[in-house]
Image: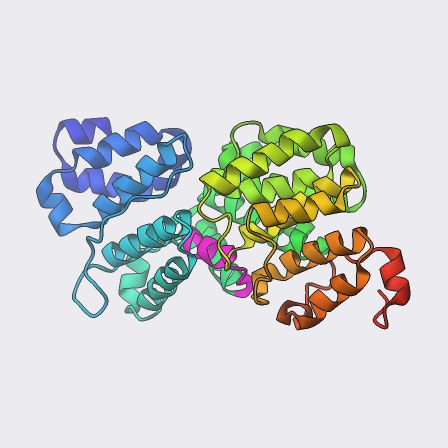
Amino acid sequence: MREAVAGERWDAVVLLLEHNWSVLIAEDLPLLHATIAALPPRVRRSQPRWDAAEAYIAHLMSSADSPVVYRDVAPRTGETGDLLDTLTELTSRTAGRRSAGRLDEATDAARRARAALDGAPDADRVAVQYSLPHLMVQWGRSHEFVGDERAALVDYLETFDLGTIAGDTVITSHVAGRIAWLHAVAGRRALAEEWLDRTEPAAGVPVRYRTEEILARALLAADVVDFAAARRHLESLGEQAHPESWAEQLFVRSLVARPADVHGMVREVEQHTVSKPTALSPRGVDAAYLALAVVRLRLLEARPLRALADLREIGLSGRAGGTRPNAPLELALALAEAARGTCRAASGGLGRSRAARRPLPAGRAWPTCCSPCSATSPTRG
């Protein structure tokens, strides 16, 4: 790569970037960033995707979980332009909007990217197939953020298949972990374990790209009350976990927390609600994970009133309108109400919510009302 840049063999540089993207992301982000930055104006004008790629790599290199900055450089839909340029720009946009908490715009960009790909000629699709896995995983992530599991799985499954064809161990292990997490959090244990078997922990994949895999393993351990194993998995994340997964991490950590952990974790919650744009988005799953974590932590202290006060303080006490991702949020509120003995309020709140009338994933034992509430409820259990 360095030799090609030094010799100004820009066609070779672009080819090397496209075919070694995954390896460079995993092993040498500074080289990847420096190489893209070295591309001359004529290359950038003819292939505007590199402007968006440079901004995205700078985001990956940042230690702070800041919003992705991107430039609208690719041709708009309906105009002529290279397919990869269009897909890269829309992918940069979906990542940028997502990290800024503008989730409707993020999913719109992901849908437009998918439509552009599906509408492209077969020859164009084949030409970009080696670049698609790292783009598609971002589309899936935006769908996952708003609780659209079906759309997320479509993108993740195709990402896995294309990564397998390309021999891209980083992306296949990464996306297998994401799929395992979705199944684990929905209570589909067998499917989660099946996808965990497809990850490759021994392949040198950086922890950042194994975050959901490790969280899925911890959650499955917590589900069978093996809290020691769950904590070991969480400890293996260290400081290298993917920053976008902060809410999932808090949720799983709350399941295995000890009373002595509560104060520090509540402080973390408070910090995240200030610093993370996705924390309070009414459309996002982060708010649901955050609410579940808060309630779980306060109930460890037997302080249900404090749980409700915390939810009010961070803006999660209002009903979310029954949007799909916030069914867990509704249940977190009901759990807090039931734990303080106001079972009628807990049952009534869920009864008014569209979320309660949506079928929840059958396998997960989502938090439900306390036993006195169940005993007096016509819908026992």
Q: Which residues are drawn in magenta?
A: 137-150
Residue 113 is a magenta residue: no
Please say whether residue 154 is visible from this viewpoint: yes
Q: Residue furthest left?
A: 42
At which x and y percent is residue 336?
74, 52
Position of 13 with respect to 153 (left or right) is: left
Is residue 365 in view from this perspective? no
Secondary structure that dominates the magenta span = helix
Q: Is residue 233 left or right of residue 58?
A: right
The quarter of the displayed image where residue 67 is located: top left
| Residue appearing at x 58%, y 32% in the figure | 202
Instruction: Kindly identify the residue that appears in the image at 50 percent across and 64 percent down.
Output: 151
What residue appears at the point 48 percent right and 54 percent down from the top-left corner? 281
What residue is rendered at 17% in x and 67% in y?
79
* Quarter the N terminus occupies: top left
Q: Residue 267 location in percent, x, y?
A: 59, 33
Residue 216 placement: quadrant: top right
Q: In this rendered view, identify the residue nearer to me: 179 or 93.
A: 93
Image quarter hosting the C terminus: bottom right
- Which quadrant of the figure has residue 320? bottom right
In this view, the residue in front, 42 or 130, is 42
